[in-house]
Amino acid sequence: MTTKRGLKYDFSLIAILLIPIGVAINFVGAQIVLLLKLPVYLDTIGTALTAMIGGPWIGMVTGLCTNLVKGILNPVSFAFIPVQMGVGLVVGLLAMSGMFTKAWKVIIAAVLVSLTSTIIASPIQVLMFGGATGNSSDALVATFLASGQQIWTAVFSTKIINECIDKVFCLLIAFFIVKKMSPRYLSKLNYGSIFIKSKKQ
Amino acid sequence: MSMITIKNLSYQYPIVETDVLHDINISIEKGEFYAVIGSNGAGKTTFCNVIRGFIPHFYKGDLRGEILIEGKDIRDWELGDLSQKIGYVFQNPFTQISGVKETVFEEIAFGLENLGLEVEIIKEKVENVLKMLEIEYLQEKNPFELSGGQKQRVALASIIVMEPDILVIDEPTSQLDPQGTEEVFKIIELMKNKGKTIILVEHKMELIAEYADRIILMQDGKVVKQGLTKDILSDEDTLQYGSALPQYALFGIEMRNQNMDLGSIPLTEKQSISVVQQWMKKEGLA
Amino acid sequence: MDQIKKSILHLYPTTKFLVTLFLCISVFIVPGYLYAYSVLFICMFFSYLAGSFKEFSDLAIKALLLIVVFIFILQSFFYPGTHVIWSWSIFSIKQEGIDFALNLTSKIVAIGSSFILFFRITKVKDLISSLEALGLPPKVTYIFLSTLQIIPEMKKLTIVIMDAQKTRGVETEGKLFTRIKAFLPTLSPLILGSIAGTEERVLTLESRAFSAKVKKTSLYTVEKTKYDPIVRIILLILLITLIIWRVML
Ligand SMILES: Nc1ncnc2c1ncn2[C@@H]1O[C@H](COP(=O)(O)OP(=O)(O)OP(=O)(O)O)[C@@H](O)[C@H]1O
Ligand SMILES: [Mg+2]
């Protein structure tokens, strides 16, 4: 049995219901980080999770909605919509090629995803916000600048370091949670079969 | 023509290796009240899902045999069209809220909005249903913040308001106290009196005995018995299939086994009183 | 006063959005940073009229202050330039950097505050309802409305779960590693629970005719007020005036 995939088929009701949950997971992830005072963001677990089991389109829409909702309180988030969407897209594509079936593959995937988000985020940060983000990582940018680097390389270096740490955690967490999902549920999603197969092995 | 005709129906869930429903043959007649009974895991919910078309449309899997709703095969129906034909209130009240409405009133109106009714008509219908189920006091509450029993009633109201011809109701009283349960049965009877066809999954035998016309008894995915309520529930044999009997019937059967012939096996409290009175007269005890 | 507040709050969502859009566009038409910064005060004034001055200011400070400060630090020290106005050891503040930062931050502040204002005076529910009237598909509306309901629910649940964990002896304080270990057990039941519910939620939506192929109606609607056309016309006139003034300049 082949499942049809793509823009026309991916937005089934069950996949659509995944989106609000994905957005909420992003928020809750960030909330728990705050409560536990952890030194990471972990605010893309939901985007990664929905992209893994719902496909790249669902992942992208989850990312889009996340920053739209964040933007209600902080409009700066609107500018970073493409970053969240990029994460959704790339995680979805990597999942389709089986990159989330083993822990070591997830770590490689995390590097690729970090690279993507850095490539998308850096121009936004440099051109629209003069290299700043308004959070603590700006200190690192300043340090790179003080050591004589150009603004582009300073932002890029800061971002890639932060992103790699964050995405390794995010994707590993998403990976472990998908592993716990029942085959019965996964079988209802267009992209779930990849994870059922990997379970049987 | 029967409302629903089921012939040689078997079904297998995806990923599962064995059939959950085996060779079911049944016809459901318009305006009758059917109670589906059987032990846990007998396949009652699965049976309901087939009738509502969620199998195969949503659950996929392997469906064999024939199931016709008003003469048209279930596979040819669109899920969207079935929603006006068959109302389905399912087992778990906690997931039966739309998730986008802020008040019970809006929640109950959701189905009618989706059917594109005019706002004035929607309001009128919702008010009527609130009155009928006596839940007007809930109308301004947030559906998320209701108790299990209240959620169950709101779920029932949300379906009844859409006025489908057939009502499939899966254990609607699991979260209700005896009084609430009785009230739900009264509402179901009201629906029956409006000419609706009712398919109800329930465990509470006393109430089934009182309200249902016919019984479908399931065990291990098969329909092991079907027929009139009075025949099935007065038959000791029914106990063999993992189902209970009303306590009044058990009493009657016990009396008969003790060679005290009540004339017939009573199913309800009222019947028990009358047969016992007759028997006492006959025996010269009263 | 109350009258003004009501008229602002009751304006149609898309009208309010046009105001925001106008403010955003205007900062690119009017040169210099003074006007752009003054948009902040315009927004403050409106928020005062609409009775949400405090929330507006709180959010504006939270969202914009730090980023503005950092832009100033980064740009004034590291922007390439020759007009040094202050220096200490290897660090020096240059006029070019300050100018660049003023220009950039003024626009960020203007755009940021006009959006913050918009969401202070517009209920998201109203916004979605007006977009629905413009033809937004029901599935999209559903996603937004459901998201707005789920987030607070899940946040509440998180607190409940964390408290339960604490009583069960899972440590949520102390060393970094202990705290990291508490993360997954808190998050995963939350996620698995809500995801398991989606299967039956689909059945609920189907049962309520969500996928019936008729045009849906809506009990909740927002109405245009008599001020809506007036506001829109004023915006249009202002925009045209600005453009003409800019071209003539
Ligand atoms: N979606 C599903 N996928 C696979 N198997 C399922 C699914 N739903 C139910 N089953 C299995 O099918 C069998 C029949 O279940 P069903 O829910 O229809 O029984 P039931 O009579 O309604 O039981 P209960 O009284 O507990 O509600 C059970 O063994 C159950 O585990
Ligand atoms: Mg059941």
Image (cartoon, rainbow, N blue to C red):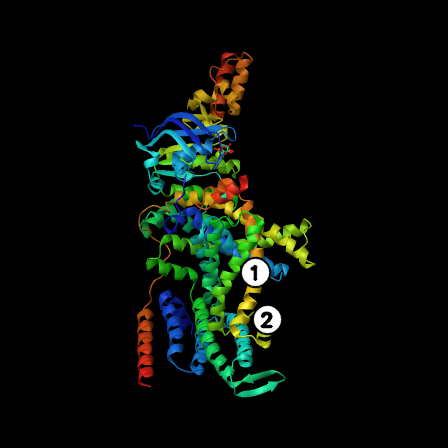
Q: Which residue is mark 1?
A: A164
Q: Is residue B150 visible?
A: no
Count neighbours of disc 1 (C-alpha within 10 A) and say few if under 14, some if 14 to 19, many if 20 or more. Answer: many
Q: Are marks 2 and 1 on the same chain?
A: yes
Q: Residue at x 47, y 14 (%)?
A: B263
Q: Position of residue B31 (x, y in %)?
A: 35, 31
C12 left or right of A40? left
Q: Residue at x 50, y 18 (%)?
A: B237
Q: The residue under label 2 is which amino acid type? A: Leu
A170 left or right of C145? right
Q: Chain of mark 1?
A: A
Q: Position of residue B147 (x, y in %)?
A: 52, 45
Q: Residue at x 47, y 75 (%)?
A: C109
Q: Is residue C142 visible?
A: yes
Q: Quadrant of the C terminus of chain A?
A: top right
Q: Quadrant of the N terminus of chain A?
A: top left
Q: Position of residue B231 (x, y in %)?
A: 44, 20
Q: Which mark is residue B231?
A: none
Image position of B152 with respect to B11: above or below: below
Q: The residue under label 1 is which amino acid type? A: Cys
Choose between B91 and A105: the one closer to the eye: A105
Q: Which circle's residue, 2 or 1, is located before the other in the chain?
A: 2
Q: Which residue is mark 2?
A: A140
SS class of the residue under badge 2? Answer: helix
SS class of the residue under badge 1? Answer: helix
Q: Chain of mark 2?
A: A
Q: Are marks 2 and 1 in contact (CB under 8 Å)?
A: no
Q: Quadrant of residue C133?
A: bottom left
B186 left or right of C91? left
The CA distance from mark 2 to mark 1 is 15 Å
Choose between B87 and B119: the one closer to the eye: B87
